[in-house]
Each structure stands twice: as C-alpha cells, then as structure tokens.
Amino acid sequence: MKQEMNTLVQRVRSGYGLKLVVIGLLLVAFIAPLAMVGQIINDRAFRSESARNEVIESWGGLAGLSGPYLLVPVSRTEWQRDENGDPIQRTVTRTVILFPETLHVEIDAATEIRSRGIFSVPVFAADTVVTGAFDRARVAERLPEWTVHWGEVEIGLNVQRLKGLQGITESVADGRPVAFEPSGDLGVQWGEAITAALPLTGPEGTPAAGATTVDFRIALRMNGGGSISVMPVGRQTEVTIRSDWPSPSFFGSSLPAEREYSEEGFTARWNVSYLSRSLPALVILREGDPGNAYTDPFGVQLFQPDNPYARNERSFKYAWLFLIVPFLTFFLFEVIRKRRIHVVQYLLAGSADVVFYLLLLSISEQLVFMAAYLIAAGAITLLLTAYGTTVLRGMREGLLLGAMIGLGYGYLAIVLQSEDYALLLGSVGLFAVLASVMYLTRNIAWFGNDEPEAA
C-alpha cells in the first residue's frame, strides 16, 4: 500500500498534476480581488446614475405630458333612504373627465450637456404645442339623465413634473384665453395637474351657440432630462417629437409609425387610435375620487450609447477567461518547452488581468470606451510581453505570450462591439481555445514517463 502511494505521488509530481492543483488554487484565490473589482464597477455605475438623476432633477425632472381634458360637473336627483329607512330625494354630483376627439402634440427639444463632476448628462428645453378639439355631445349621449353644469367646466392639463414647466406662452380654448393654475393631481392619475376655468354656458344653461366642438391650442415650454413622454388621451392622437439628439431610444405603449435619423438629430411621429389604448373617451369620477384615468404613455429616451459602465460590466463577464489565458500559456510553456515557472510568477501574471479592468474603468470615465479599451489592453499586453520575455527566457517566447494576450483582448473587443452576436462569438472563441489546447497537448504523457499499457 505504501509503495502504491509513493508511486502515485511520484506520478503526480512528474506528470504536472501538482502544478495543475496549484494553478486551480490560484484561480480560487482570485475570486476575492475579482469580486472587489466587480463591486467597484457597480459602485461607479451607481454614482454615475445618482449624479445623472441629480442633474435631471435640478433641471426639471423627467418631462411628460397628458391632456388636455375637460372636467365637467354633472348632477341628478335620486331617491335614497335616510338613517331611519325613509325614502328621501338627494342630489348626486359627479365629475366627468372628457378627453379630446383629436389631439395633436408637437415637441421640439433642444439638448445640451450638463456635468456633475466627471459625469455628463443630456438635458433639454422643449417647446411644445398642443392642439385639438373636444366633442361636448358625448357627455349628453353617455349621461342623458344627468344635468350638465356647463358653466362650471374646467380644462386640465397634466405634466410629469411641474418644476420643469417654464411657462405657458399661449392658452386658448373655445376661442378665448384661459389662465391655468396648479391643482395637484386632479383628473388624470399621472403627473401633476394645472387647470383653468372654462365656462361653456349658453342660453338657459345649454351649450353656447349650439356648438358641440371646443377647440383648444396650448403652447408651453418644458425643461427636463432623460426622457420625453406623452399619454395618448385623444380619441385620435398624433404626436411628433423632434430633437437635435442623435441617439434616441423609443419606449412605451406605442412605437413611432415614422422615424428619421441623422447626425443633426431625429424626428419621430406617432399615430395612435383610441382602440389601441385602455382609456375610454369619457370617465365618470365617483364622489371624492381625485382622478383615476390612466393609460400607458410612450416617448423617447435620450440614450447615451457610449455608457462606460454598461460596457465595463459586459467586459468584466469575461474576466475569468482572461485570467486563465496567461495561466494556461505559462503552463503550456512548462509542459512543451520545459520552462520552469514559479507560482509567484503565475500570481503576478494573473494580477495583470485584474489591473486591466481597473485601468479600463478609470480611463473610460475620461475617454470614449473603445479608446480606453485600446489603452488598457495595450498596456497590459506590453507588460506581459516584457515580463514573459524574462520569465520564459527568450524574446520569442515573450512575443508569443504577448500575441496570445493581445489576440484575446482583440477578440473581446469584437465581442463587445457586436452585442447581438456576443454569445455566438464568445462560444466560438471558447471552442477555438479548447481545440488549440487539446491539439498542443495531444502527445503529452500526463502520467510522467510511464507509457500506458497496451490493450
């Protein structure tokens, strides 16, 4: 038994088994430093997002628009029972939210870059014009037994954040100017509301001049950042958003029917029918209900394509692969070229990969990501090439090590650029590495000098 154990130990030592065990332990030891690097990336991304939100909030917040709509009081007399159970007549009042028949929204957003420390955030000033018309006949059609108090009608408009509303340059409804005032969240359950009195009383309380159409035109200016959104409250909603920002990202319940891109900006147009939304043309609010009308908005986000933190997180997913590459290269030199390499030298070569991700993160905060990637990858490749020349005792060996490291970084750059095909390219790359290792080690006697017994 003792002789068999000695034979096994001798085979492990002579067959590089011990070195493989040590390399495995080194890889396990790198779990902690890699986890720390990942935490640093996450912390910087969180700090960037916090700075972005602070800038957007101080500039006016997220920009959004919902409305306009009419708040129409209605009432009727109903028989009810009092506390004693006796029948009694009571007047019941309700508020009806009437949405437009047609709604046209034109938004022109001029962007600029604001900074908080090293973080840059796009913000905008949006000139918005809202036009359309209400059909008053829908109230009588829907509520024939109710009395409509046209003289107490209000017109309302919701914006996502009132602090971003810089002013209303024009507000005309039913052919006359109206003066808006803040009124909380009354009417629509989204954003913050402004309302204005719009009495529509005609002779004896009937609709004025017998007209059923109420036209409106509202022009306002909003500051904001991050995104612009619109809630399609019209029976037929048409929205056009223009901006000089070159990288839009559309979101929400509807995508634009038409879109145009150029280096000078974009133009997007939506055409939304009431059949494709979850909001009726008329909503009746119960007594005490501040407003529950809502449908999913849509809009555009000012996308920053060269976000360094998202790309750093993607590249960090391949950290283990690039940690294995120098280890595997050193081990192959030990096996094939009979170069003895110390464990400390393995450790230093692996540490270079950890430093690569720190370099990439710090430089990408100052430069565009691919420039930062080339600088960090080039620095680590040159470092390992020079180190390998000494450790492997030969210029040729050092250049070969540097070529393998550089090839790996170059392949990762291609993977990061081809987001849609990242999984495919990564899988093919791993297969190529495995096939190369199997080919280079096909004739190695892993049990030392002993040849396997013939079958």
Image (tube, grey):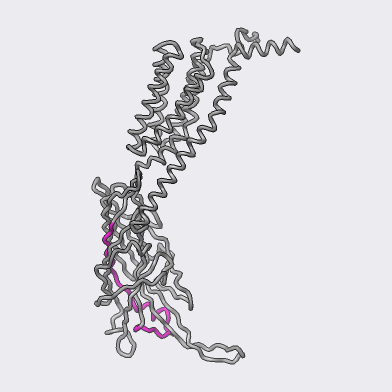
Q: Quadrant of residue 107?
A: bottom left
Magenta segment boundaries in residue numbering: 125-151
Q: Nearer the viewer, residue 295 or 162?
A: 162
In the image, 437: left or right of 381?
A: right
Instruction: Please name the residue shown 44% across and 71% down the image.
Output: 291
Position of residue 428 relative to residue 311, above or below, is: above
* Image position, residue 178 (x, y; %): 28, 75
Residue located farthest toward the front when viewing the structure as drawn: 117
Question: Looking at this view, is 97 or 171 the one in front?
Answer: 171
In the picture, the quarter occupied by the N terminus is top right
Q: Is residue 418 magenta?
A: no
| Residue 230 x %, y % | 35, 61
Q: Quadrant of the C terminus?
A: top right
Q: Write down the quadrant of residue 100 in the picture.
A: bottom left
Q: Quadrant of residue 428?
A: top left
Q: Is residue 282 left or right of residue 12?
A: left
Q: How many marks?
A: 0
Q: In this rendering, is residue 47 above or below 233?
A: above
**Image vertical order of residue 374 relative to residue 281, above or below:** above
Residue 285 x/y as whole percent: 46, 75
- Find out whether residue 148 is within the magenta segment: yes
Front residue of 42/227: it is 42
Question: At which x and y percent is residue 129?
Answer: 27, 64
179 relative to 450 in the view: left or right: left
